[in-house]
């Protein structure tokens, strides 16, 4: 997974519009990047009128510091994937035996073109789980991902743990990301990955109403943790994790 860090200067230069080629995204028409969207905005209110959230499981919102997943707390029948090893109907492995699903989270970023070059050179395709806040800043990279034959899926707008959000906030996170990807590519996504893998029955209910299929991953040992590089983690550990996983698969 590659995490994007955009300087305040870069954000400032992009606040009016992003215009490259045929892609035009006006940032003032979207929520603030990396922040939970306002559910009272006209756009979100219109989206909420299009779906019926009655019948959503009554599960209390989890609590977590910003930028972190919530701690595991026993909640009866919540079916939390990360805490209860409960995937429900989420996708956790490829359907065809012996098939490896290559996925990258959190982009796009300034590092993504180099990754795309590598994948193209090696004739590899992957699934990119996109953060809406990054999509509006780098729309042409998203367009290239499609042109190069990759698969796009949602990773929410602000990368906030979904079990900590209200049903309405989940809708806002998903729909703003959907709108951004549609503006960049003309395509609507079908799959999504919850940030930190944080998902329960209530979150799944809302996602289902929005037409999304959750995609987790096979297990923690399948995460290369490349996003940790520079914070006490080096590329040798990343390569070793990947090699060991392949050897043991």
Image (tube, rainbow, N blue to C red):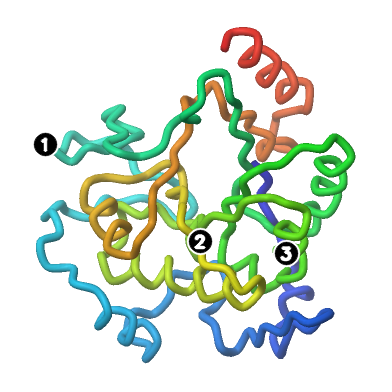
Q: Nearer the viewer, residue 191 or 195?
A: 191
Provide the residue designation for mark 1.
76
| x, y percent for residue 242 | 68, 21
In the picture provided, is 55 more to the left or to the right than 89? left
Label located before the other in sequence (1 or 2): 1
Q: At x 26% / y 65%, what residue is drawn?
A: 166
Provide the residue designation for mark 2.
189
Quarter in which the N terminus is drawn: top right
Label located before the other in sequence (1 or 3): 3
Looking at the image, which residue sits at the far top? 248
Provide the residue designation for mark 3.
6
Label 3 near label 1: C-beta < 8 Å?
no
| Mark 1, other Cα within 10 Å: few <14 / some 14–19 / many ≥20 | few
| x, y percent for residue 196 | 46, 43
Q: For residue 18, what is the image quadrant?
A: bottom right
| x, y percent for residue 21 | 84, 80
Q: Please state which of the two labelled residues, at mark 2 or mark 3, is closer to the viewer.
A: 2
Q: At x 60% / y 89%, what residue is drawn?
A: 28
Q: At x 22% / y 47%, what residue is drawn?
A: 201
Label 3 near label 2: C-beta < 8 Å?
no
Query: In terms of secondary structure, where does tag 1 sit?
Result: loop
């Amino acid at each position: 997974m590659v995490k994007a860090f955009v300087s305040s200067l870069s954000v400032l230069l992009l606040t009016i519009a992003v215009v490259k080629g045929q892609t035009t995204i006006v940032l003032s028409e979207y929520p603030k990047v990396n922040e939970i969207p306002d559910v009272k905005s006209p756009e979100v209110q219109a989206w909420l009128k299009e779906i019926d959230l009655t019948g959503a499981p009554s599960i209390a919102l989890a609590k977590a510091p910003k930028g972190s997943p919530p701690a595991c707390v026993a909640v009866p029948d919540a079916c939390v994937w990360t805490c209860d090893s409960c995937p429900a109907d989420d996708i956790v492995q490829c359907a065809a035996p012996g098939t490896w699903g290559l996925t990258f989270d959190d982009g796009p970023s300034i590092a993504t073109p180099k990754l795309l070059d590598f994948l193209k050179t090696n004739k590899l395709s992957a699934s990119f789980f996109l953060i809406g806040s990054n999509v509006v800043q780098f729309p042409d990279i998203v367009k290239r991902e499609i042109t190069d034959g990759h698969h796009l899926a949602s990773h929410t707008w602000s990368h906030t743990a979904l079990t900590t959000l209200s049903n309405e906030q989940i809708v806002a996170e998903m729909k703003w990301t959907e709108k951004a990807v549609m503006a960049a590519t003309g395509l609507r996504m079908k799959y999504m990955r919850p940030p930190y893998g944080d998902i329960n029955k209530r979150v799944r209910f809302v996602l289902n109403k929005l037409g999304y299929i959750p995609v987790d991953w096979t297990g923690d040992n399948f995460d290369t943790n490349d996003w940790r590089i520079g914070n006490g983690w080096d590329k040798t550990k990343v390569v070793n994790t990947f090699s060991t996983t392949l050897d043991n698969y």
